[in-house]
Image (tube, rainbow, N blue to C red):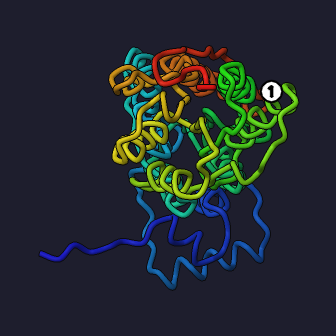
Amino acid sequence: MNSVKHPTIYDIASEANVSISTVSRVLNNSAVVSEKKKAKIEEAIQKLNYVPNVIARSLANKLSHTIGLIVSDLSNPFFTDVIDGIEHVISKEEYFAFNCDTRYDLAREKKYIGRMLQKRVDGIITFSTNDDAYELIKDAKQLVPVVSVQSQFRDTDSVNTYDAKGAYMAVEHLIKLGHKKIAFIVFDYDNLTIESRTNGFMLAHEKYGLPLNKKYIFKTKFGADAGSNVTNEILDNHPEITAIFAYNDKLAVASYTAIQARGLNIPDDMSIVGYDDTVSASIVNPKLTTVSQPRYEMGVKAAELLMKRIREKDEKAEPELILLKEKLVVRESTRALKR
């Protein structure tokens, strides 16, 4: 049998070129909407033959005991550890979570947030990777509480670490080992975490009087071969580079693949530092020097904050920023530069 696709509130919002929250207000008569927007929404409803879910609307004022998790890369062990912390908290409250993997794609993020709101989640925890997602977060916040992790949006609760400081410690460690030509491998997206770690990379150079070559900041799009492709570019075109600082452990481990495939040695031929201290950091050979984040605690704090917002239902509450500390874990992937 062929399944019949029924239009959703997300489709109405797209057709009328308005936010999901505006459509919701019209359907529920919950707030004043301009006549112009209301007419566009009603026109879209008729055009798409939209039939509201009566059961869902009848439960509008009750809790669904579900939350939405917007994650940028579920294959990254960092998120697995954070989600463990989230699950630990919400399971005690008999809550369940919907996990959605955006793969660093803003369009996917928009779609998933829309679907979550349609499913009447009681709140959302987002690991949004794009500053352009602010409008999405703003719209969602008009309907449910939102907490961001490793990202920060205006007027939104957030759990984060001192990313600039962590990056600074990583690069400082390499500089103290004698490395002066250091590459930084980072994703090519605009968000607070990437900006902060880039600033930490640059600040360490400034602090130790090293000239900063911006060509040593290698940007890559999300993909299975991202770290190895960039590392091959470094090995092919920049033989003077003796150390790599990777934005996260996943990129660092991918660098291992490219370096070792050429018969080169880590750390004799190239020192590497990662970020996150995921399980992969301690099982690769050699074990990876990395910046450790309290991943599980980040999840716990985010879930506790979201549960608090759901219980209190205080739309005027001041947004809270929780900052947790990171530390440098020195292992076997870095060594003093050979003279």
Q: Is residue 328 left or right of residue 77?
A: right
What's the amino acid at mark 1?
A: Glu
Q: Quadrant of residue 96?
A: top left
Residue at the extreme front of the image, as rendered? 339
Q: Is residue 118 visible in this depiction of the protein?
A: no
Residue occupying the point 51% across, 22% down = 289
Task: Say if 231 sits above or below 154 in the image.
Answer: below
Across and down, in percent, residue 328 comes to 60, 16
Q: Is residue 76 above or below residue 174?
A: below
The residue lying at 69 percent from left, 39 percent from top is: 181
Query: Mark 1 — residue?
Result: 318
The answer to whether one can see residue 178 in this image is: yes
Q: Quadrant for the N terminus, please.
A: bottom left
**Horizontal side of residue 183 vs 211, given as left or right:** left
- Describe residue 203's horizontal placement relative to residue 62 as left or right: right
Where residue 40 appears, x then y in whole percent? 67, 79
